[in-house]
Amino acid sequence: MTDAQLAAQLALQAGQILIDVRASGAFEGKALGKEGDRLANAFLCEALRRERPDDGLLSEEEKDDVARCSMSRVWIVDPVDGTREYGEARSDWAVHVGLAINGEAQAGAVALPGLGGGIVLQTDQPAPLPEAAPVPRLVVSRTRPAKEAVEVSKAIGGELVPMGSAGAKAMAVVRGEAEIYLHSGGQYEWDSCAPVAVAKAHGLHCSRIDGSPLTYNNKDTYLPDLLICRPEWAERVLNEVAKLS
């Protein structure tokens, strides 16, 4: 099984675990998010350690073993990206299973269990980008839209689309539901590794908001900003962000 196939299989299975936990009715709200995180993390970490025992592992829900920093292949996972949305029984949350090789997000999958139908986007099955909308749509946080995204939207005549998790936003661009995802409010490597791998495989531009590369498997896992967008918008958006600094 290839890395991408493994990532997709595990993301799909973790997503089903999360759906089942929510459907059980035994938990709700923050307690549901905590239990879902716990079970999905245990499943993903055990499976990755079994299937790829020589690789490193970084998970939002595990104590970090910095020995991974000396490894060339490191799995970076977020068992529930968008815990709040998951706990609120919304659909805009995701499961991230990404693989960084020599610091670059190269393989992985993002599952969108809340949408139903077993939707998983993966690096080895890229699809052509759907036709862009005439007015560019920028996906932003439901609660804290990034200042840069708001200003860029005004500058390019765009439309803001509030959405939950980072994975849901990134996949909205992949799926043709938006053209731009610009974030500057603080994230960690597990928030973007799998989405960036998938987005790049589908032909999207992926970078920091200053245009520099996104690098992974750092000792400090804080990776606060990113731009995922259709390639035809990358230069314009980066230029508009530069004007704000």
Image (cartoon, helix red, strand yellow):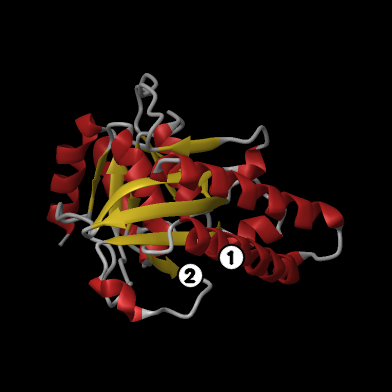
Seen at 55% across and 58% down, the residue is 47
- Residue 27 percent coordinates (x, y): 81, 66
Q: Is residue 50 visible?
A: yes
Q: Residue furthest right?
A: 25
Q: Give, as a three-letter code, the residue at label 1.
A: Asn
Q: Give, as a three-letter code, the residue at label 2.
A: Glu
Q: Quadrant of the C terminus?
A: bottom left
Disc 1 on helix, strand or loop? helix
Q: Is residue 151 left or right of 85 when viewed as pictured?
A: left
Q: Is residue 187 visible?
A: no
Callout 1 crowding tier (Cα within 10 Å): few <14, some 14–19, many ≥20: many
Residue at which label 2 appears:
60
The residues bearing labels 1 and 2 have C-alpha atoms spaced at a distance of 9 Å
Seen at 21% across and 29% down, the residue is 232
Disc 2 on helix, strand or loop? loop
Instruction: Work out whether 47 lies above or below 204.
Output: below
Q: Nearer the viewer, residue 20 or 237?
A: 20
Seen at 27% across and 62% down, the residue is 216
Q: Are marks 1 and 2 in contact (CB under 8 Å)?
A: yes
Q: Is residue 126 left or right of 148 when viewed as pictured?
A: right
Residue at which label 1 appears:
41
- Residue 38 percent coordinates (x, y): 65, 69
Q: Residue furthest top?
A: 131
Quadrant in the rendering for residue 30: bottom right
- Residue 101 percent coordinates (x, y): 26, 55
Q: Is residue 131 left or right of 79 when viewed as pictured?
A: left
Q: Look at discs 1 and 2 and give the one toward the viewer.
A: 1
Q: Nearer the viewer, residue 84 or 220?
A: 220
Q: Nearer the viewer, residue 211 or 50?
A: 50
Callout 2 crowding tier (Cα within 10 Å): few <14, some 14–19, many ≥20: some
